[in-house]
Image (cartoon, rainbow, N blue to C red):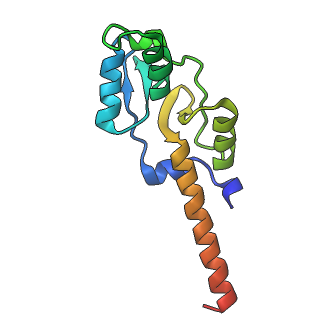
Amino acid sequence: MIATVTVSSILSSKGSQIWSVKPDITVFEAISTMAEKNVGALLVMDAGKLLGVISERDYTRKVALKGRSSRDTTVREILSAHVISATPKQTIEDCMRLMTENRVRHLPIVEGDTVVGIVSIGDLVNWTISAQHAAIEQLENYITGL
């Protein structure tokens, strides 16, 4: 069942809220937004165009460990510009494989040139666990005749 369900199912249940920042704000402002929204990554967008992703990992590796100041560094300077993305029609399994192979934790969902949502590895794992629990319950009911 999991192999055929598309990522649009997750977006339908979790919503398609997208948190984004502009590339010229400071990393400090971006990290503050992540904390406020309780997310680990933000899309970097300008004029509706996806330019990249900034994550807590980017901050840690490209600012903190290099002794840079988050108040003096712009998002543009450290964003991950090579964006791995998926379409709403891709399966959850495809998305998990993409994220694992590319070592990313957040996957923008794009339709044409438009970002329609974002999923995290946590979203995919939670959906998979819920689907497995539902399948187990159905099998138990079948076996017990309920």
In this view, which residue lies farthest toward the bottom? 145
* Left or right: residue 129 compared with residue 93: left
Q: Residue at position x 41%, y 14% from top?
A: 75
| Quadrant, the C terminus | bottom right
Relative image position of residue 34 (x, y in whole percent): 35, 31
- Residue 86 image position (x, y, % from top left): 61, 35
Q: Write the residue at 60% across / 37% down.
A: 87
Tell me the residue at 38%/32% (across/down): 19
Asked if residue 49 shows in the view, the reply is no
Q: Is residue 18 visible?
A: yes
The residue closer to the viewer here, 114 or 22, is: 22
Count of picture labels: 0
Q: Quadrant of residue 21?
A: top left
Does 135 sit above or below residue 130?
below
Asked whether 62 or 74 is in front, the reply is 62
Image position of 139 (left or right of 54):
right
Figure quadrant of residue 47: top left
- State the image coordinates of residue 27 (x, y, percent, origin top left): 36, 17
Between 113 and 92, the residue placed more toward the observer is 92
- Quarter of the picture containing the N terminus is bottom right
Residue 68, x across and y down, in percent: 40, 9
Residue name at image x 49 percent, y 38 percent: 118
